[in-house]
Image (cartoon, grey):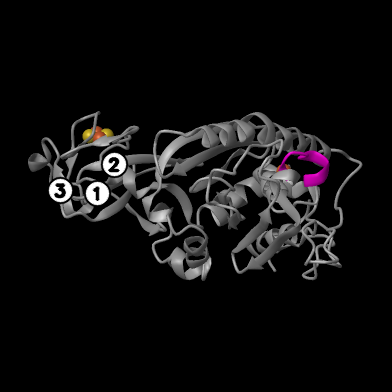
Amino acid sequence: MQRTNPLAFDTGRFDERPERSYTLPAGWYTEPAVFEAERREIFGRSWQFAGHVEQIAQPGDYITVHLLDQNIFIIRGKDGVIRGFHNVCQHRAHELLAGSGNVKVITCPYHAWSYHLDGGLRTARGSERVAGFDAGDFCLKSVQIEIFNDFLFVNFVPEAVPLEAQAGDLGAEMRAHAPDLGRLTHAHRLTYELEANWKIIVDNFLECYHCPIVHPAFVELVDMASYRVVTHGIWSSHHAGPGKESNSAYDFSAGDVRIHAVWWLWPNMCFLRFPGSGNMMVLHILPVAPDRTFETYDFYFLDKALNAQQREAIAYIDDVLQPEDIVIVESVQRGLRSRGYDQGRFMAGDPSSGYSEHGVHHFHSLLAAALGGA
Ligand code: FES
Ligand SMILES: [Fe+2]
């Protein structure tokens, strides 16, 4: 794949008009150079999911988060303020905190430099004998943190526009569909390792053209005739009316949630509210290598104890829906390496159809803007 300048990968026959456009070239999914550019220009600049505010409810509570090759922690200070820092000691770069927990002081496990919860250097053994040592030069390096509908997001760019501003109406639309959002608590996590580029997983998430072929139970769970994909700035919504209460996916008749409402947020985040009792699921699609991706599926419910319907819904996702999609995306990864393929077409002639692929085109246009020099 040709690069005409350091930040411009060839977009081939990609076109701003979905009905005229080809998909991005196969090399975007396989080339290490694209992956490196994404690490810097996409994941180094966008808001990334980090957890839920309930995880750091008390002063001193912290969580650590790994995003590609970066390790950060988020901590609530004695003043109640939530702050984020690169998880690295300013002495000789040992990592400071591991996992999650509560601390009164942040102490480095290597030579025991200590830091206040606001990132200021507290003690550095022997520094009084070091010429010109200024503790003010050795504060922890901060990252931006934002609370978005009670979810924690992190951004490495100090001047990044707040997510709430970048995402426009997304926060309000989620709250309108999920008025119980503020009462939900983390109840379950599923994780997956996939042999596929992260963008194939996003592409697959953004269209239901494949649903009747790949997901026979899902097309009973939701009403495909009312399935709609609407694109907005850096996110898209995917909504459908209820399918059959009793279906081969799971029985949702006991719950209040009827509308299937799903949102994708640039570049790699999905929020899902499935039919059943009050819920929000967070799917985080984390790139590991050009052809490897780690997924976390976090389930937030009104109660930590799962009811029968929730257990059934989780089992459907884990045993049926995810395996159905994983087989697809791993096959596409192999296909994108084939010398017999480069660019396909979007089936996006009728964006009012639930089967249209204009949501995938929307994602590709954001990718092209980030890395295609457009
Ligand atoms: S690396 Fe942290 S105290 Fe030395
Ligand atoms: Fe799917």
> In this view, which residue lies farthest toward the left?
128
CA distance separating discs 3 and 2: 29 Å
Q: Residue at x 85, y 62 (%)?
A: 13
Kindly identify the amino acid type of the residue bearing the numbered disc 2. Tyr
Contact (Cβ within 8 Å) of mark 2 with mark 1: yes
Kindly identify the amino acid type of the residue bearing the numbered disc 1. Arg
Q: Is mark 2 within 8 Å of ligand 1?
A: no
Residue placed under numbered mark 1 in the picture: 76
Secondary structure at badge 2 equals: strand
Quadrant location of residue 187? top left
Residue 108 visible to the viewer: yes
Residue placed under numbered mark 2 in the picture: 62
Disc 3 versus disc 2: nearer the observer:
2
User: Nearest the camera: 68 or 284?
Assistant: 284
Q: Which residue is drawn at 73% across and 49% down?
A: 28
Q: Residue at x 29, y 41 (%)?
A: 62
CA distance separating discs 3 and 1: 28 Å
Q: Indicate the position of residue 274 as horizontal and vertical percent values.
A: 58, 48
116 lies left or right of 268: left
Residue placed under numbered mark 3 in the picture: 133
* Quarter the C terminus occupies: bottom right
Report the magenta residues as a range.
211-218
336 lies left or right of 371: right
Residue density around tag 1, few if under 14, some if 14–19, many if 20 or more, within 10 Å: many
Q: Which of marks 3 and 2 is nearer the N terminus?
A: 2
User: Nearest the camera: 284 or 14?
Assistant: 284
Q: Indicate the position of residue 300 as horizontal and vertical percent values.
A: 45, 44
